[in-house]
Image: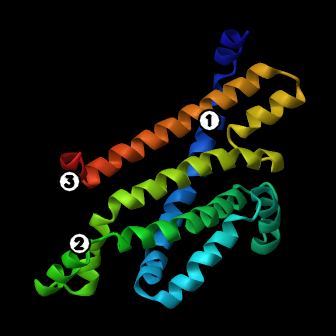
Amino acid sequence: MIWDWIPRNQPLILGALGEHVVLSALPVLIGLVLAIPLGWLANRFPAARALLIPAAGVIYTVPSLALFVLLPVILGTKILDPANVVVALAVYTLALLVRAVADALAAVPRSVILSATAMGFRPPRRFLAVELPLAVPVLVAGLRVATVSNISLVSVGALIGVGGLGRLFTDGFERNFPTEVVVGIVLSILLAALADASLIGLGRVAAPWTRVAS
């Protein structure tokens, strides 16, 4: 029974859950850090947008399993190195967030930018103090999609031996033990729901004016 199996395998479950959190959260952070300057370029220069946005779309169409297998050849890592999953998902996150950052910055009213410039804000300060904070609502929407997608894609890494909760899927199927599969699925869904709710809350804290508007 499922309620007997869970307590007896708590270390296994918690270990897989912890690995899943790290493998899905770290690429989001890396992708966001890289996407902000690239998204700024795409918003600031039409030529950069014409290059970056289509390229990001093409990258995101590459199958995740193929990328997991290809990266060890490119990076010189071992096939079971978790870095392969982190880098692959960071690439997918970057591909998703470049457009999100560009669209978020484009949504900032032009009048606000002009007002900040008239008040003496230089471009770097204006970006950090005015444009980026006002872009938070749209940016958080992109982050939610990227985060939930990563939580789902991490499980695919189990096919090459690195996959957090995905290991419960593969082990359960190999042993014909549905309980392990069900536990992995339920925890993946709960983790995605918790991450999504956390980002919604973070967005409301970072952009309190949206709460007033609603």
Position of 189 with respect to 202 (left or right) is right
**Pair 1/3: label in front:** 3
Which residue is depicted at the point 75% across and 58% down?
64
The residue that mark 1 highlights is: 188
From the viewer's side, name the closer residue of 209 and 14.
Answer: 209
Regarding residue 12, the answer to whether it shows in the image is: no
Position of 214 with respect to 62 (left or right) is left
Q: Name which residue type carries label 3.
A: Trp
Q: Earlier in the sequence, mark 2 or mark 1?
A: 2
Q: Name which residue type carries label 2.
A: Val
The residue that mark 3 highlights is: 209
**Pair 2/3: label in front:** 3
Which residue is depicted at the point 79% across and 56% down?
65
Residue 202 at x, y percent in the picture: 34, 48
> Tag on residue 130?
2
Q: CA distance from mark 1 to mark 3?
A: 32 Å
Residue 200 at x, y percent in the picture: 38, 45
From the viewer's side, name the closer residue of 34 and 210.
Answer: 210
Position of 105 with respect to 60 (left or right) is left
Other-residue count near label 1 (Cα within 10 Å), few / some / many at <14 / 14–19 / ≥20: many
Residue 110 at x, y percent in the picture: 25, 78
> Tag on residue 8?
none
From the viewer's side, name the closer residue of 191 and 115.
Answer: 115
Q: CA distance from mark 2 to mark 1?
A: 36 Å
From the viewer's side, name the closer residue of 67 and 19.
Answer: 67
